[in-house]
Amino acid sequence: MERIEEDLQQDDEIVVTLRNNYNTYSFNGKKKLVLSTTSWLGGKNDFLGIAYLSVGGLCFFLALSFTVVYLIKPRRLGDPSYLSWNRNPGGH
C-alpha cells in the first residue's frame, strides 16, 4: 500500500504499476485500484464516528436513567424480598 504525500492538482498524472502476485483467474476474481483522500481524522466515511457517538450517547443516557431510578427508589443490597419465589402472588 503506497501513499501520495503531496497534494495533487487537476491534470496531474499518476503512474501505477500492478503486479500479478496473486492469481485471481482461478476463481474469476477481480482486482481493483482505489484512490481515496484522508485527513488527520481519517477517511471520508463518517459511519464509525457516528456509531461511536450514538452508542456512547445511549450508554450515557442509560447510566443516567439507572442513577435517577436508584436515587428515587433505592433497594437494599442483598434484599431477598426481590426474589421471585419470595413475592406474595396476590400482592397482599
Image (cartoon, rainbow, N blue to C red):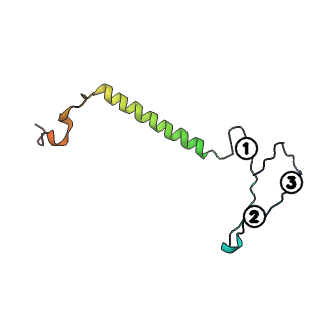
In this picture, residue 18 sits left or right of residue 73: right
Sequence-wise first label, 3 or 1: 3
On the image, numbered disc 3 is attached to which residue? 14
Dots 2 and 3: beta carbons under 8 Å? no
In depth, the one of 6 and 72 nearer the eye is 6
Secondary structure, mark 1, is loop
The residue located at (59%, 41%) in the rendering is: 49
Residue in the picture at 73% in, 40% down: 39
Q: Mark 2 highlights which residue?
A: 21
Q: Relative to residue 23, is residue 87 drawn left or right?
A: left
**Image quadrant occupied by the C terminus:** top left
Q: From what the image shows, is residue 90 above or below residue 26?
A: above
The residue that disc 1 covers is 38
Helix, strand or loop under label 2 = loop
Residue drawn 19% across and 42% down?
A: 84
Residue 78 at x, y = what percent?
A: 23, 31
Left or right of 50? Residue 66 is left
Amino acid beneath label 3: Ile
Query: Of the residues under marks 2 and 3, which one precedes in the sequence?
Result: 3
* Residue at point 21%, 31% (across, down): 79
Which sits in the foreground, 43 or 21? 21
> Separation of disc 3 and disc 1 at Cα?
17 Å
Secondary structure at numbered mark 3: loop
Tell whether label 1 touches label 3 (CB within 8 Å). no
For the residues labelled 1 and 2, the Cα–Cα distance comes to 27 Å
